[in-house]
Image (cartoon, rainbow, N blue to C red):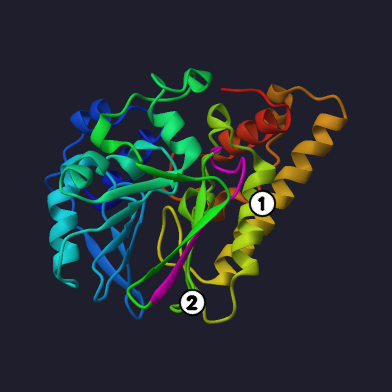
Amino acid sequence: MQPRTLFVLGLLGISFAVAPVAAQQDFSNVQIRTIPVSDGVYMLMGSGGNIGLSVGEDGPFVVDDQYAPLTEKILAAIAAVSDGSVRFVLNTHWHGDHVGGNENMGKAGAMILAHENVRKRMNPAEFRDVMESSQQAPPDALPVVTFTDGVTFYWNDEKIRAFHVPHAHTDGDAIIQYTNANAIHMGDTFFNWMYPFIDVGSGGHIDGMIHAASAGLALSNSGTKIIPGHGELATPDDLREYRDMLITVRDRVQTMLNDGMSVEEIVGAKPTSDFDARWYPENWFIAGDRMVRQTAESLLNIES
């Protein structure tokens, strides 16, 4: 199975429970790629969301952990560039391709951290107000420390700042800034050169996606390296083009809604046709029509 096919299969399950998704996939051929980002910061790519890794004297600090069957490979990749066990795992949001390794990491002694809505989405037995679009995770997979607006870690001679961007990809997204390394992990608020998945059922919204991209750009300069939730390591120019595409699609769809068109009529009008060649790569699961539909549904506050 080719790496791109594995990658797409991983994305197809991002809003579903971790165990059934993992059981349906063959992870045996997945290779973990370790990409240097800056001094002490790496990006790990396998199947699922990109992992951020800070290394140094204090120990590995991990952002997201993909799927449970990949934990051993991920830990081996971490051990190749860092000594010691993983001390922290910070989740950018609640989807299974980003939190699937939480239980393994938690049992091994890592402290799981996330925005408070991530714990709510992963623990509906406790938070019944978000029973829709959620999954009951094992106790060891749940975040044990949560935050509302943001939190800062002084770790590995680095200032790691996580801050919440509301109603973007979901209602619990966090962007992580490695201040000294001049690097940013955007989570799934940024799909590099792909149409994004906007999880409207989990509180996602096109306007929040645009705001998140703008927030990332506000933290950037010409030398900033940007880890997207999916796709290759990016530059501020990549993020800017992505943000501008989102704005154009949003504005086109909003104009059609203002003109009284239905969602189906807007989808049929194909307002992304001039973008599709660039933003809908081979085997990707968000085509132009789905991009239009989720944009319209978020603008209409329709959960799907």
Residue 245 falls left or right of residue 159: right
Q: Residue at x 37, y 25 (%)?
A: 135
Residue 278, percent from left and from top: 55, 56
How would you rate the neighbour count of disc 2 (Cα within 10 Å): few for under 14, some for 14-19, many for 20 or more? some
The amino acid type, in three-letter code, at marker 1 is Ile
Above or below for 94 versus 130: below
Q: Measured from the top left, where is residue 179 in percent x and y?
A: 49, 74
How far across and down, in percent of the image, does residue 114 sit?
A: 42, 46
Is residue 193 at least partly visible in the picture? no
Residue 48 in magenta stretch? no
Residue tagged 1: 210
SS for dot 1:
helix
Q: Nearer the viewer, residue 151 or 298?
A: 151
Asked if residue 268 is positioned above or below residue 51 in the image, the reply reads above
- Position of residue 107 measured from the top left corner of the image (x, y, whole percent): 17, 42
Direction from residue 193 to residue 260 in the image, left or right: right
- Which image quadrant: the C terminus? top right
Mark carried by residue 182: 2
Q: Amino acid at mark 2?
A: Asn
Residue extent of the magenta highlight: 158-171
Q: Is residue 162 magenta?
A: yes
* Separation of residues labelled 1 and 2 (CA atoms): 21 Å
Q: What residue do we see at 48% from left, 77% from top?
A: 182
Q: Which residue is at a point 29% across and 46% down the rendered structure image? A: 66
- Seen at 22% across and 33% down, the residue is 22
Q: Is residue 179 above or below residue 281?
A: below
For the residues carrying marks 1 and 2, which lies nearer the camera in this image? 2
